[in-house]
Image (cartoon, grey):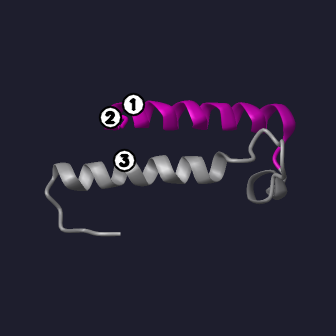
């Protein structure tokens, strides 16, 4: 399992690559919401969300929060 810092670094790297893609190719909503098989952003949205939720869960655990998804 990744540490919170590792996950945050992965999220920043993913965001940097996304911004680079957007600047180089423009951004059509289909690129993000329905990229299709083989597209550079095919798994981006789900991967980013899953990593972000892991960070959120870790942060709540660190603070002994009673918040639950």
Q: Which of 15 and 64 is in front in this view?
A: 64
Going 25% across and 68% down the picture, which residue do you hit?
Answer: 67
Going 55% across and 30% down the picture, which residue do you hit?
Answer: 13
**Residue 7, percent across and down?**
42, 36
Q: How far apart are marks 2 and 3 (CA)?
A: 9 Å
**Callout 2: few (<14), some (14-19), or many (20+) C-alpha neighbours within 10 Å?**
few
**Residue 39, percent across and down?**
82, 43
Vertical comparison of 9 with 41: above or below: above
Q: Distance between the residues labelled 3 and 1?
A: 10 Å
Left or right: residue 25 compared with residue 14: right
Q: In this picture, which residue range is highlighted in magenta?
A: 1-27
**Residue 15, percent across and down?**
59, 37
Which is closer to the viewer, label 2 or label 3?
A: 2
Q: Magenta region's main secondary structure?
A: helix
Element type at mark 2: loop
Left or right: residue 27 compared with residue 10: right
**Callout 1: few (<14), some (14-19), or many (20+) C-alpha neighbours within 10 Å?**
few
Q: CB of mark 2 within 8 Å of CB of mark 3?
A: no
Q: Which mark is residue 6?
A: 1
Left or right: residue 34 compared with residue 17: right
- Tell me which label, 2 or 3, sits earlier in the chain: 2
Q: CB of mark 1 within 8 Å of CB of mark 2?
A: yes
Q: Does the magenta run of residues contain 21?
A: yes
Quadrant showing the C terminus? bottom left
The residue that mark 2 highlights is 3
């Amino acid at each position: 399992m990744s540490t919170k810092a590792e996950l945050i670094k992965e999220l920043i790297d993913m965001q940097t690559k996304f911004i680079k893609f957007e600047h180089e190719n423009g951004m059509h909503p289909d690129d993000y919401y329905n990229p299709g098989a083989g597209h550079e952003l095919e798994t981006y949205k789900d991967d980013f969300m899953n990593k972000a939720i892991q960070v959120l869960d870790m942060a709540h655990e660190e603070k002994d929060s009673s918040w639950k998804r």
